[in-house]
Image (cartoon, rainbow, N blue to C red):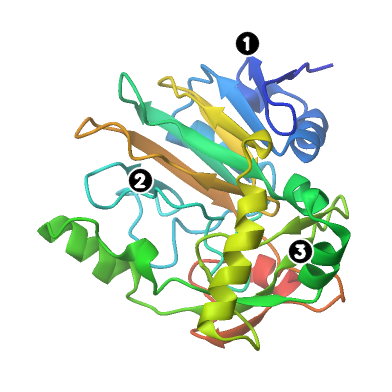
Amino acid sequence: MTEFRRIGGRIGAEYTGADPNDLPFEEVNDALLAHKVLVFRGAGLDDEGQLRFASRFGELTRAHPTVPSVDGQPDILPVNGEEGIRSNNWHTDVTFVRTPPKLSTLRALVVPPYGGNTLIANSAAAYRDLPDQLRDFADRLWAVHTNDYDYAVPRSNTEKALEYRKVFTARRYRTVHPVVRVHPETGERGLFIGGFAQEIVGLSGTESRDILRLLQRYVTRPENIVRVAWNPGDLVLFDNRITQHYAPDDYGDLPRVLHRVTVAGDAPVGVDGESSRILEGDDAGHYTPAAAAAAA
């Protein structure tokens, strides 16, 4: 039996010693559902190996709804930590579309000698931490997620940063998701918010910000977070349905390059059994494969 070593009290486990593609799928999937994040140390995969590993969990998405892929690899997103376009914001991948990715894989190609870690948070533990009254309130809330907000505002006015902002928002998406998502495999409830969640349906902007900040503080409590310190060749797999992540901008002008591959997901379902719905934009069919979109 494959043994994963826990690396956090509430989230995360790691494995060292074999090509992840050689491990029994059922054992890896069970470990992922239990720990939310799996770190494969020294996996040593190339692009094809990462694609093969991710595809074991389902049909792959394109690299991103708006951002270009790695040349010749339409399903691989380059995560290049250039100044001004770093993702140092808590978020869940691509929640601005109706069917966000089920899972995300990140593979380290180039890492700085210090900093450049990835923080990943357990949103199910955050939900369980809520006081009963706040949990009941959150169960009834729906939030609007969009790609057109300050996540994509460049922190510098370089030409590259401004161009990234333009590309990121080339298609505008606004989607309503439940604030509390029911995990389709485990039945766990988790706070499905993060940076792309910008307003609460039926509330003002000020009220929305206050409530989202309150709930977000539970997600990012230190006890709910695991910090992944990268080595070249490491592979990280996380459940995008019940986690958030953050890449601290703490490595100056040093290079940091990862490759991301995501698995197509379904439309989130709330406590009331209702599914997410589109407010603006299309169904991201160019991004989410037809089979996965139909299943949602």
| Badge 3 amino acid | Arg
Left or right: residue 243 compared with residue 257: right
* Residue 42: x %, y % from top left: 51, 16
Q: Nearer the viewer, residue 58 or 83?
A: 83
Q: Residue at x 71, y 74 (%)?
A: 294
Q: Secondary structure at mark 3?
A: strand
Q: Earlier in the sequence, mark 3 or mark 2?
A: 2
The residue under label 2 is 78
Alpha carbon separation for disc pair 1 and 2: 26 Å
Q: Nearer the viewer, mark 3 or mark 2?
A: 3
| Badge 2 amino acid | Pro
The residue under label 3 is 181
Q: Earlier in the sequence, mark 1 or mark 2?
A: 1
Left or right: residue 168 compared with residue 287: left
Q: Is residue 257 above or below residue 151?
A: above
Q: Is residue 279 above or below residue 273?
A: below
The residue under label 1 is 17
Alpha carbon separation for disc pair 3 and 2: 28 Å
* Residue 90: x %, y % from top left: 50, 52
Q: Residue at x 74, y 36 (%)?
A: 32
| CB within 8 Å, label 1 to label 3 | no
Q: Nearer the viewer, residue 171 or 143?
A: 143
Q: Nearer the viewer, residue 42 or 126?
A: 126
Left or right: residue 194 compared with residue 184: left
| Badge 1 amino acid | Gly
For mark 1, does the 10 Å Cα neighbourhood hold few (<14), some (14 to 19), or many (20 or more) residues?
A: few
